[in-house]
């Protein structure tokens, strides 16, 4: 409710503040409103996904991508995003029109108070505060008690809590069946909140060793984060990182996880999941950490009796659990120790998907999520009973756990009334009855506790501890300290588990394989490798699943470390225009480096350590950085790096919309005038373009001198007569390809004004801005056979 009140208060302040203000102040208010609405849109959509606004899962999936996600069920979220975008664009226009009629009157004092309050609203916006919190910053003062806890937390080293498990000692090798239930938190078993929702699992929990206080820490509250936490004892932190999992060859290769330990102990590692293995990098994680046979949607769908019986996320749980049964039967006959992991999907937010195996819905059937939970209770409990009755259960440990607590879904309002904790149950044949364990725990502790149930007692994995023995858990050890704050302070320690290689041996580019190899690590292209002064790779950045291109990442960087950029030559040319515009190219150096490596890659190419070292020690020049950044900006805006770019202001007109104008010469090029309303592609020759008060560009007239006869081209003549058009606010003269087809002088004018054409030449880009009566206001001429752009705004 407070979030919506903040939005109402802000809009009221914006409307009050814009009254009787000068045009520049009204524009400032409009832009502030635009930013505020974008922040509100991010908060609203994030909350619909996470239930709590912007958190670690938002940053992770922006980084790792959404390949394999079930987009069909997020149409409302997409519509909400579109609505906020439209509102953010409409707000400045509305505020401008509110202010314009009264610009001659003095603003009311309340208007100034409202105007000054607007930036404060942005500063304290939930999206702002939550994002800063992920970076361990805050906009609100802490109490003395909180400050002391923060100081204590910042002084606690990661090594004090992290334990490397090493290798499992020789011992019993019980089989393991581990079933992750998607978002199926323990709260669903609360019969007071959800009468009769999950009676079968509730009854089975009482027969198991079950854990009642398993918390999800920062970086663990989404599927891949939950898998990493429960198997590696680590959170998955990505805020501030630009890694895209698809480009990495391995997923946290330095971590030792449950799969690694069991595989090394001689167990065959299997995984069955209904969703696409690409989503969140699950496939990379599993294959990196001991799983020899991970199978997902693409592998399992062809095995279905009806391959079309799938949800927007993947296999329904009845189909998946049938595959678990058949795999279990096959593993039992092999006579070798095995581990079989599975991850269900029916209870995925926001609405769930009920398998057809379940006939009756939950109660009146109106809540689809609760229908899916109720169905999962039936089909999962049936499988549990079947496994417990199987002939090899005497030598098997069965684990049922949620991957994380539920994100925002159709049952969130009821879930919030309960104690939000994860489900975690262990079944063994040695149990004489159920046992409740109420220790302060987290999903970090699941892996060591599973090992304990299998016979390897008192093992630690990362931050996780054995809940069946006496060592303090992470939550118990930190007492009143905020665990999420402490985890955030360890981001560098945790990101070290990605184990980026060193350039001490150089690297090799393999264009046929679309790979770069460094110290036997293989990374997909295109890539930016960022080096420190000792030639170690600080991070690898990819653009497969990110929302920004590599050129956008480079332009946004605040540091000037040396990079290795391997990409299409048309992009890498931003570093040196002498590179060709076709094929694969390489750049090594800082943006400010005087000495760099720049070349086209036609075959396997080795960059040795000596060459890399020379580049890292190169002298720098601020001018080079400025030029390269300017070309990166050109690449990001126009798609090519060699545009001569200029900026102008619209202070002398009524145009509010930003306008981008591009003049290109030569065949197979494009020239245009682009506003937020439209992008007008231009014809060969001299184009007279008008922009109206609504911000729409339209062609007034085109003159193609190249169509003239040889005699006519001797002195090309043309006069553009502009009819009075009150809707036009400005005019542009833009050359595309070539203004004339000879070196002869032009004799052209607009309403008798010829200044705008005096510099037009053969194959030379040209842009001029005119008044609506034809007077020249500004003009720019680019180099022959080049490109030219002008960005205009207020």
Image: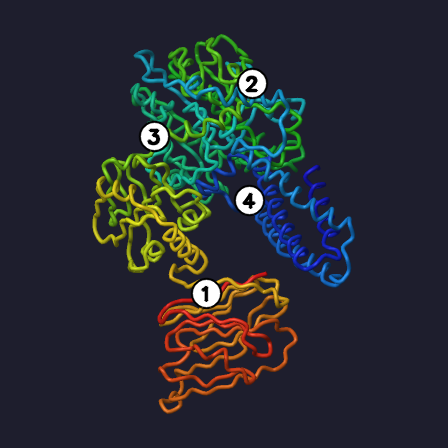
Above-or-below relation of 701 to 2: below
Q: Earlier in the sequence, mark 4 or mark 3?
A: 4
The secondary structure type at the circle numbered 2 is loop
x and y, in percent, of residue 352 in the image: 56, 37
Q: Nearer the viewer, residue 663 or 749?
A: 749
In the picture of the structure, the residue carrying the numbered disc 1 is 789
Instruction: Classify residue 640 by image quadrant.
Output: bottom left
Does the CB distance between marks 4 and 3 fall below 8 Å? no
In the picture of the structure, the residue carrying the numbered disc 2 is 213
Above-or-below relation of 142 to 514: above
Q: Earlier in the sequence, mark 1 or mark 3?
A: 3
x and y, in percent, of residue 50 in the image: 57, 36
Label number found at residue 214: none
The secondary structure type at the circle numbered 1 is strand
Point 32% across, 44% down: residue: 524
State left or right for residue 574 relative to residue 190.
Answer: left
Instruction: Classify residue 608 by image quadrant.
Output: top left
Alpha carbon separation for disc pair 1 and 3: 46 Å
Q: Nearer the viewer, mark 2 or mark 3?
A: 3
In the picture of the structure, the residue carrying the numbered disc 3 is 253
The secondary structure type at the circle numbered 3 is loop
Residue density around tag 3, few if under 14, some if 14–19, many if 20 or more, within 10 Å: some
Point 60% across, 79% down: residue: 773
Q: Nearer the viewer, mark 1 or mark 2?
A: 1
Alpha carbon separation for disc pair 4 and 3: 34 Å
The secondary structure type at the circle numbered 4 is helix
Above-or-below relation of 81 to 779: above
């Amino acid at each position: 409710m407070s979030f919506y009140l903040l939005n109402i208060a802000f809009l009221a302040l914006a409307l009050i503040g814009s009254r009787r203000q000068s045009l520049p102040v009204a524009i400032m208010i409009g832009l502030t409103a635009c930013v505020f609405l974008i922040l509100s849109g991010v908060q609203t959509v994030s909350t619909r996904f996470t239930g709590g606004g912007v958190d670690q899962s938002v940053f992770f999936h922006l980084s790792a991508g959404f390949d394999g996600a079930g987009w069909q069920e997020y149409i409302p979220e997409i519509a909400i995003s579109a609505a906020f975008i439209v509102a953010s664009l409409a707000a400045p226009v509305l505020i401008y029109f509110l202010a314009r009629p009264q610009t001659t009157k003095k603003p009311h004092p309340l208007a100034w108070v409202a105007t000054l309050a607007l930036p404060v609203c942005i500063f304290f916006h939930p999206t702002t505060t939550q994002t800063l919190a992920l970076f361990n910053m805050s906009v609100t003062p802490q109490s003395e008690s909180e400050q002391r806890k923060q100081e204590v937390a910042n002084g606690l080293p990661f090594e004090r809590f992290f334990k490397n498990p090493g290798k499992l000692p020789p011992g019993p090798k019980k089989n393991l069946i581990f079933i992750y239930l998607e978002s199926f938190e323990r709260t669903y078993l609360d019969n007071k909140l959800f009468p009769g929702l999950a009676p079968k699992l509730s009854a089975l929990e009482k027969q198991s060793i079950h854990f009642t206080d398993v918390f999800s820490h920062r970086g663990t509250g989404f599927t891949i984060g939950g898998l990493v936490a429960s198997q590696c004892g680590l959170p998955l932190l990505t805020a501030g990182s630009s890694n895209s999992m698809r480009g990495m060859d391995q997923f946290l290769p330095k971590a030792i996880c449950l799969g690694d330990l069991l595989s090394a102990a001689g167990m065959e590692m299997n995984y069955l999941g209904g969703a696409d293995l690409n989503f969140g990098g699950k496939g990379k994680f599993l294959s990196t950490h001991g799983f020899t046979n991970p199978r997902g949607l693409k592998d399992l769908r062809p095995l279905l009796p009806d391959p079309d019986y799938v949800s927007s996320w993947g296999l329904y749980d009845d189909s998946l659990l049938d595959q678990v049964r058949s795999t279990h039967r096959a593993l039992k006959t092999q006579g070798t120790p095995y581990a079989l992991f599975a991850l269900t999907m029916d209870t995925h937010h926001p609405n769930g998907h009920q398998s057809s195996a379940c006939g009756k819905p939950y109660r009146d059937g109106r809540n689809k999520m609760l229908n899916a939970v109720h169905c999962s209770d039936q089909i999962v409990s049936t499988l549990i009973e079947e496994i417990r009755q199987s002939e090899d259960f005497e030598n098997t440990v069965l684990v049922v756990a949620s991957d994380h607590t539920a994100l925002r879904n159709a049952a969130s309002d009821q879930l919030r009334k309960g104690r939000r904790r994860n489900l975690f149950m262990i079944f063994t044949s040695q149990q004489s009855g159920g046992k409740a364990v109420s220790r302060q725990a987290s999903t970090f502790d699941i892996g060591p506790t599973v090992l304990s149930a299998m016979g390897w007692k008192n093992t630690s994995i990362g931050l996780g501890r054995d809940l069946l023995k006496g060592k303090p858990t992470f939550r118990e050890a930190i007492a009143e300290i905020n665990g999420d704050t402490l985890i955030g302070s360890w981001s560098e320690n945790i990101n070290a588990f990605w184990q980026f290689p060193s350039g001490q041996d150089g690297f090799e580019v393999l264009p046929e394989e679309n790979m770069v190899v460094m110290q036997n690590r293989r990374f997909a292209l295109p890539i930016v490798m960022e080096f420190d002064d000792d030639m170690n790779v600080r991070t690898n950045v990819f653009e497969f699943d990110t929302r920004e291109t590599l050129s956008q990442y480079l332009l946004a960087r605040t540091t000037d470390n040396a990079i290795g950029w391997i990409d299409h030559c048309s992009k890498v040319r931003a570093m040196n225009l002498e590179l060709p515009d076709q094929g694969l190219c390489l750049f090594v150096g800082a943006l400010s480096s005087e000495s760099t490596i720049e070349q086209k890659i036609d075959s396997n190419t080795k960059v040795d350590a000596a060459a890399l070292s020379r580049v890292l020690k190169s002298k720098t020049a601020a001018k080079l950085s400025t030029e390269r950044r300017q070309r990166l900006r050109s690449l990001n805006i126009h798609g090519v790096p060699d545009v001569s770019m200029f900026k102008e202001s619209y202070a002398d007109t009524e145009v509010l919309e930003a306008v981008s104008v591009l003049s290109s010469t030569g065949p197979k090029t494009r020239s245009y005038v682009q506003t937020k309303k439209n992008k007008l592609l231009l014809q060969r020759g001299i184009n007279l373009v008008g922009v109206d008060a609504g911000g729409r560009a339209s062609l007034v007239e085109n003159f193609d001198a190249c169509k003239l006869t040889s005699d006519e081209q001797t002195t090309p003549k043309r006069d553009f007569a502009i009819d009075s058009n009150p809707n036009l606010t400005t005019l542009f003269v833009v050359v595309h390809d070539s203004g004339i087809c000879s070196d002869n002088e032009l004799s052209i004018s607009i309403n008798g004004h010829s200044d705008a054409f005096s510099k037009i030449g053969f194959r030379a880009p040209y842009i001029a801005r005119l008044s609506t009566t034809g007077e020249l206001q500004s003009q720019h001429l680019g180099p022959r056979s080049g490109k030219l752009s002008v960005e205009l705004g207020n």
